[in-house]
Image (tube, helix red, strand yellow):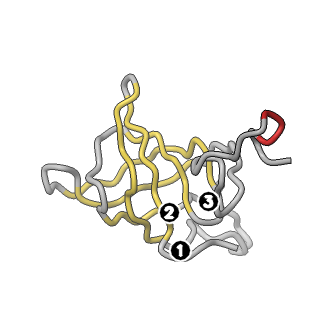
Amino acid sequence: MPIGSAFGRHPSPEDRRRSQRLRLQVPVFVRGLDIYEDEFLDLTKTIDISSVGACLASPRPLRLHQLVSLRIPAPSPSSSGLIPEASPPMPARVIRSYPMGDVHLVAVEFARPID
């Protein structure tokens, strides 16, 4: 049953998502240009993630529509070489960014949905 339907209301646009969100904290490297056009590489984490995007806890503000590159670091190195050092870069676009305490919550949309 969609959220709100029990009360005779239709779900709001925020409740109608293209993909289900998972509240999952995953470490992620974010690379891009900050609001001052300085290149950065930050290790941060997701707040939630879906197949089409994620919400990140960023130490810096990012511009709307800015392109960033995301990489998930790999666990400790394996001597077998079967575990890669990091995921391939995932291009993403900033669709929302706002301060929340000492971090900035940044919503990004992936260039391609992940499987």
Q: Which mark is residue 71?
A: 2
Indicate whether 25 appears above or below 13: above
The kind of secondary structure element at disc 3 is: loop
Q: Position of residue 17 (x, y in %)?
A: 64, 57
**Residue sitting nearer the eye, 68 or 74:** 68
Secondary structure under tag 2 reads: strand
Judge left or right: residue 69 versus residue 49: left
User: Which residue type does callout 2 highlight?
Assistant: Arg
Outermost residue toward the top?
A: 101
Eye-nearest disc, 3 or 2: 2
Q: Earlier in the sequence, mark 3 or mark 1?
A: 3
Spatial CA span between label 3 and label 1: 11 Å
Disc 1 is placed on an element classified as: loop
Q: Is residue 34 left or right of residue 70?
A: left
Amino acid at dot 3: Ala
Give neighbour class at mark 1: few <14, some 14-19, many 20+ (Cα, 10 Å). Answer: few
Residue bearing the label numbered 3: 74
The quarter of the rendered structure image containing the C terminus is bottom right
For residue 88, which numbered disc appears in the image?
A: 1
Q: Nearer the viewer, mark 3 or mark 1?
A: 1
